[in-house]
Amino acid sequence: MNIVVCVKHIPDPNIPGELEGGRLKRSGVQGVLDPGDEFGVETGLQLKEAHGGEVTLVSMGPPTAMEAIRRGLSMGADKGLLVSDDALQGACALVTARVLAAAIKKSGPFDLVIAGVESTDGYTGTMPSTLAELLDVPQVTFVKRLDSADGTIRADRQTAEGYQVVESPLPALITVTAGVNSPRYASFKGIMAAKKKPVDNLSIGDLGLSSEEVTSMQQIASVGSAEARKAGEVIEDDGTGAQRVAEFLKEAKVI
């Protein structure tokens, strides 16, 4: 089973972030493998242990993003692929999906692509769905439990009311929740072995993408402080309380 896991190198979320030009500062700060992606790596490793095959880590970012790939390799992944190009600085979710799709296709045939529900530094949550569309494969999101057999996957998909049981043919793409497993720690042996595992470094030219395809269409208009939370209104029920609450909700366009 050939499994691809999308991983991202982000500023350490345990350290207060800084803005630079309206964007999160990434150079000169402590970076880590996105904690949400550790669950994806663990999912891939468990599937490999159960069905054989290999786990490939794919990432996009500056050269320092190699730290995230090495972290995943030390957990047990087999190889990595990093797309690094100055033209990708400040890339939006759509451009990221295009680059990852091209990198995954270049890496060879795959059975399953695994991603986190959303990145810890961006929280758009749109990239995996866009990636599935570009790869032309079905997707199952918010997976909290996963089984695979006979060329299909069967997943428990987390919802607000509980979970749905969903089946999909392979190849496919899934996003995993933080509760899907308990990511393993990298052993000293794994850390040493990771240094010898193959990692390809590619540019957008290697992927055959044009400058138009990697140009972000989004711009940051402004960055400001969040509005201070206002005090709520206290309504004393004099017999008209229910009506006043209803009027308030109607003004807020809730009802």
Image (cartoon, rainbow, N blue to C red):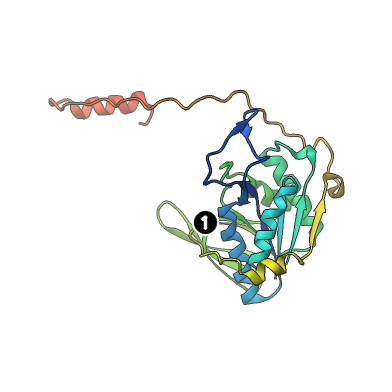
State how many labels appear. 1
Which quarter of the image is occupied by the C terminus?
top left
On the image, numbered disc 1 is attached to which residue?
177
Of 214 and 195, nearer the camera is 195
235 or 54: which is nearer to us?
Answer: 54
Residue closest to the eye, 60 or 109: 60
- Observer-nearest residue: 94 or 13? 13
Residue 149 percent location from the top left of the image: 61, 74
Residue drawn where x is 79% and y is 43% of the image: 85
Drawn side of residue 53 relative to residue 155, left or right? right
Determine the image quadrant of residue 124: top right
What element does badge 1 sit on? loop
Residue displayed at 25% across by 28% down: 245
**Which of the 4 quarters of the picture holds residue 78?**
bottom right
Residue occupying the point 86% across, 49% down: 206
Position of 234 relative to 130 (above/below) = above
Q: Position of residue 129 (x, y in %)?
A: 63, 48
Q: Position of residue 215 (x, y in %)?
A: 76, 34
